[in-house]
Each structure stands twice: as C-alpha cells, then as structure tokens.
Amino acid sequence: MKMKNSLFIKLGLFGFLVTMISSCSLFDLDINEDPNNPASASPNLQLTAIEIGLMTNLANNEGDCETFMGLMGTQALSRYDLNNNSYSGLWDDMYTGPLKDLEGLIAASQTSPHYLAIAQTLKAVAYSTMVDLWGDVPFSEALKGDNNDKIINPKFDKDADIYASCLTLLDEAIANFAKGSPVKVDGDLIYSGNIASWTKAAKTLKLKLLMTGRKGIANSTAQITSLIAAGGLISTNAEDMLFRYSKDPTSVRHPWYTGAYTGGEFDYTYICHELMIESLVDEDPRWPFQFRRQTKTILDSNDPTQFNSQPCSGGQSCIYGYVVNNKNIVDRLYTNKGLTYGDAEKAFLAGIFGRDRGDGDGIPADGGFRAIPGVYPCGGYYDVATPAAPAANAAQGAGIFPFLTGVNTSYYLIEAMLELGAPGDPRAEFEKAILERCDEATLVFFLWQWI
C-alpha cells in the first residue's frame, strides 16, 4: 500500500511540474537581456540623452579650443604638444554616445517629422563641429559596427563631402519642420519643443556652414544671399541655440563648474594671464562676471616654498609670470593711467593667478590660488573685493553652453556684407551685436540664475 501511495505522489508531482513548465517561457530567464540597457527607447528619452551628451561633450572640449586661441593654459596643448591620444576621449564619447543615439532617433522617427528634423539638425551640428576640429572623419561608414554587414574600420570621408551632407541634412530638417506632426516633441532641453525656434536654428546653422566653407562650395554666394533675404534666422535671446545646465547638484552641471566649484581645486585648468590682463587694460566691464579670484595673498618670491607655487616657478622666461610683481603690468594698469598702486591694488593683482601661453613648467601646488571662471558661462561666483576659495557647490551652477546665438548671426551677416556684397550696413549690425544683443544676453543669463 505504501508503494502505491508513493507512486501516486510521484506521478502527481511530475504532472504538476509538466503543467508549470508548459505555462511559462524558457526565455523568461534569458540572462543575456539587460533591463537597464533596453534595445529601444521612446523618442523623448532619446532626445534628452542626445542633447545632454552632445552639448556636454562640446562644452568639455571648449577649453581645448580656447587653449589654441591663447585664452586658456595647459601644459601640453598651449605648446601644441599633440599626440594620438590628445582627443581620444572626445572622439570616443561622440561616436559611442550622441552620434550613435542620433542614428537610433532618426530611424525611429520616420513618421514623426519634428523629432526627425531635430535629430537631423543635431547630426549636422555634431559632424560639422567635428570637421571644424579635425577635418576628415568617419561619416558615411561610421556607426555600423553592430550591423549585420558590420564595418569596424570605417573610411574617413573628406571634410568637404561631410559639409555637403550636413547642408543636405539641414535642408531636409527645414522641410520636416514645416510639416505637421502627429507627435508633440517632448524631452527637448534646448527649445522645449518650440518648432519655430528649431527652424530658425537650422537656417542659422546652414548660414554658418555656408559662410565657413563658402570658398569650397559651389554657388555659395547665391545660396548665402538667398538665405539672408528669406530671413527667419536667430535674432533674439529667446531664439538662441543654447543648452542650460541644471542648478541641482545631483544633476548635469557645466563642466567648468564641476571643475572649479565642487571641491576639486585641481580639476579646473588655468586661464591665461594675457586674457585677464588685456581685459583689465581695456577696462572691460564684464571682467568680474567672467573671472573669479581665489586669493589676495602675495607670495614671497624669496621663499623657495612659496616660489614653487608661483606661475613660471620653474624659471622659464614668461611674458607676465607672477603679475603682481611685474612692473610692466603695474605700469599698464595703474602708473600709466595716473592711478594709485597701493595695498588694495596689490591684493587685487595677487588673484590674477593664471598661466602664460607656452609655459612648459610642471603643475605646482597652486590649486587654491588659480583664477577660475565666474558667473558667465558656468554659473559660478561674481568676483568680489575679498576673494576666497569657494565652498563646494555653494554657487548657483546654472551654467549655459551657447552653441549658436543672434550675435553669431550678426557676425555672419557682417562678413557677408563686407565680403560678398550682401545688402545691409555692417557698422549698424556690429553695434547691434555689441550693444543690444550682449546687454540682453547678460540680463537673460542672470535672470536664469535666480528663477
């Protein structure tokens, strides 16, 4: 009897297991599916990620471009000491991040003209900027490493061909913006889904590319004059193509803010002395908005422990060096203007602590002395009479990355007037850019800091 009961129990368990197995899928336990990295995402989430990735990558690289212009100072780039790895970070981040995501958004937006148009515009932004930086880059065969017919060594397309493709992308984007769309754009951190502003951005970017590459583009003069005559370009602050970083310390901050205002004294590089000094010589009223001093202490050049913290501490001859002790600088800023150079002025110059272009010395222990970016554009501090190293995350941090503005439009128009005979008054346009637009832009930025 026991044997029969045992047999019935085993048969019952077997039947239960068969029922359970037949009611579930073996693929429910597929360990190759990562729920944190889905194969597809909604267009609004893709767009947000693309804009953050693209604009932050470009803002991160801004310091390198300014180094070549003599505005920032680093050990290597300011001496044109480049190697194969100098831009590997930006290169990898662009191709594995926003560029790859843009292709996904384009593929998923064929029935959503406005999402598609934004993606086409941002793709033109990305590749035209890369051409401006590096010349020939992978384009037509890029981003196909995971295709069935994968290409793992894409060819480098000619810069002129990429520019032509970007102009085509912008024409397609402008046409798509003009269409009705069944889907409202969401997740847009640049224009909040304002299609009229996006249309102006695409047209202004097209003008930028035509002006930049006009000598190598057939019929560029006719295209430029036609585009200007048609109007619809960026002209007001509300239309500026810029990325606004968050005030939230846990969110995405401007890379300059992250480097200078989050407690990492050595994360931000040097501002070149020449930029700060020439701005003071010209009595530029924007100085305290753009630069923030961290110290008023004058280091003793006769004390070896303090001397090693000074600019050009290795002894290499410099144009400015430690400016507070440089008579030429004192004469330019004070003596030649009939101004007093007393203790207050010395304390002020002690904070003009940067680096000379081409200085090959090592990095001294000067993290708490270096001048850092001010309110504009990273959302840091206004310069004050008594400077000090900022407490971590105490500033607002609502920085911006202005990619394309009405001031840029004015300069494109001025060049077209002077070089191509486009109609208009270049002097009036220049005054508009300097007086009207810059004042408005400053006001808007400061309002953004506090709302």
Image: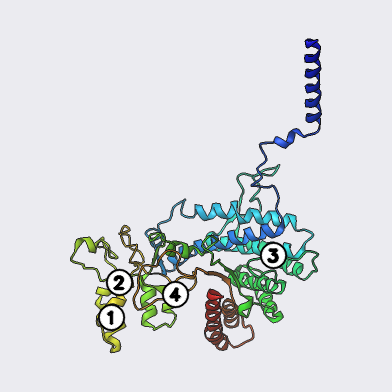
Residue at label 4?
Answer: 290
Q: Earlier in the sequence, mark 4 or mark 2?
A: 4
Residue in the foreground of this view, choosing between 76 and 450:
450
Return the x and y of residue 270 as percentages of the image width and height. 38, 65
Residue in the foreground of this view, choosing between 36 and 183:
36
User: Which tag is nearer the camera, tag 4 or tag 1?
Assistant: 1
**Quadrant of image for the C terminus:** bottom right
Residue at label 2?
Answer: 320
Disc marking residue 448: none
Q: Is residue 234 among what the camera can see?
A: yes
Residue at label 1?
Answer: 344
Q: Earlier in the sequence, mark 3 or mark 2?
A: 3
Q: Is residue 131 among what the camera can see?
A: no
Q: Say whether residue 57 is left or right of residue 368.
A: right
Q: Amino acid at mark 2?
A: Tyr
User: Which tag is nearer the camera, tag 4 or tag 2?
Assistant: 4
Circle 2 sits in a helix, a strand or a loop, which is it?
loop
Disc marking residue 118: 3
Q: Residue 236, relative to residue 184: is it above or below?
A: below
User: Which tag is nearer the camera, tag 3 or tag 2?
Assistant: 3
Q: Please identify the quarter of the rendering in which residue 298 is found.
A: bottom left
Q: Residues within 10 Å of mark 3 (few under 14, many from 20)?
A: many
